[in-house]
Amino acid sequence: TVIYGVIGDPIRHSKSPIMLNRAFREKGINGAYAAFHVTPGQLEQAISGVRGLGFRGLNVTIPHKIEVMAFLDEISEGARAAGAVNTIVNDNGRLIGYNTDGIGYVRSLKEEAEPSLAGKTIIVLGAGGAARGILWALAQENPAAILLANRTESKAAELASSLSPDYRISSLSWSDLREACSSADVVINTTSVGMSPNIDAIPIDATWLKRGAVASDLIYNPLKTAFLAQAEQHGCRIHGGLGMFIYQGAYAFEYWTGQSAPVDAMREVVLASFG
Ligand code: ATR
């Protein structure tokens, strides 16, 4: 049996074990995936354990995605741009860090809402770790522009200027959002506004968007945030955050096994686990 896992603090609510074990079973792969509670003080030892026990792969979640990078042998370009690692591949003792959150998000957005992002104008709300995690992957799609807006405007300006000018990412004042949204093709909420238990909160008024534009939310609890519900009412296409979780796991599965991920089975088991 090939061993895999996820580390985090807290970890007990993680849906990754049921999702990845389902994927192994679907593909007839002899793998086992477990969740491990690892505190920040135990992180280095946990990574030594991956080496010593010969785990093939590990997912890394909050609060370790940044700190774990110090203990790896190689970091992928996408993970470096995201400033975070969520997937480790153990390649015969060499630990390589990847970030599948950003590319998982983009794959989900393309599969579920907007097949081509090339030439599109994209607005990203928020400038925290979640925003940084998707910017590189969005930029790979050759959009016309990526506009970053944050309540604390200096953080959006800082994040935009920390990334290569090749990515065409610029910052936008929060007070200019209304006007900017009226000509954007995709508006993505990466802020925590609307997350359970504050499910009635919205980051911006979704009626500012063009009808037919895509409203997307990284939040998946609830599955449909108030922002998405309002956007849908207004005539927008909507995209929730569950697909990002499914596809970050799908990419991890693919990096570890070299096989295509059974995405439908993975989604089904995760949805069922919400009860
Ligand atoms: P994450 O890693 O999930 O992105 P974070 O780094 O704490 O978490 O960032 C949270 C994001 O949500 C920030 O962009 C934050 O804006 P500020 O930088 O101004 O704090 C945004 N956010 C949180 N509450 C908000 C609110 N009520 N209105 C607008 N933005 C909010």
Image (cartoon, helix red, strand yellow):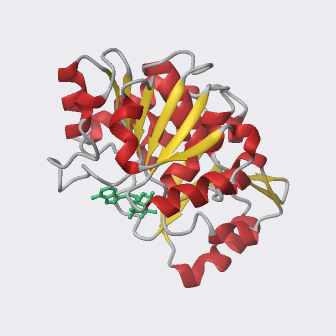
Q: Position of residue 46 (x, y in %)?
A: 63, 73
Q: Is 14 located above or below residue 119 in the figure? A: below
- Quick one: which residue is furthest to the bottom in this view? 41
- Disc tally is 0
For residue 84, above or below residue 224: below
Instruction: Check the picture and name the quadrant holding the C terminus.
Output: top left
Quadrant of the rendered image holding ligand 1: bottom left
Of all residues, the one furthest to the left in this rendering is: 200
Q: Is residue 171 left or right of residue 204?
A: right
Residue 131 appears in view: yes
In the rendering, at what x and y percent does residue 37 appear?
46, 71
Residue 140 is left or right of residue 102, and the answer is right
Between 24 and 112, the residue placed more toward the observer is 112
Q: Position of residue 129 (x, y in %)?
A: 52, 58
Q: Residue 102 lies in what quarter of the image? A: top right
- Name the residue at 56% across, 68% down: 64
Residue in the image at 48% along x and 27% along y: 109
Front residue of this view, candidates 1 and 123? 123
Horizontal and vertical percent for residue 182? 36, 26
Q: Is residue 272 left or right of residue 134?
A: left
Above-or-below relation of 102 to 42: above
* Residue at horizontal 42 percent and vertical 47 percent from the top: 190
Q: Can residue 56 be seen in this snapshot? A: no
Q: Residue at x 25, y 33 (%)?
A: 206
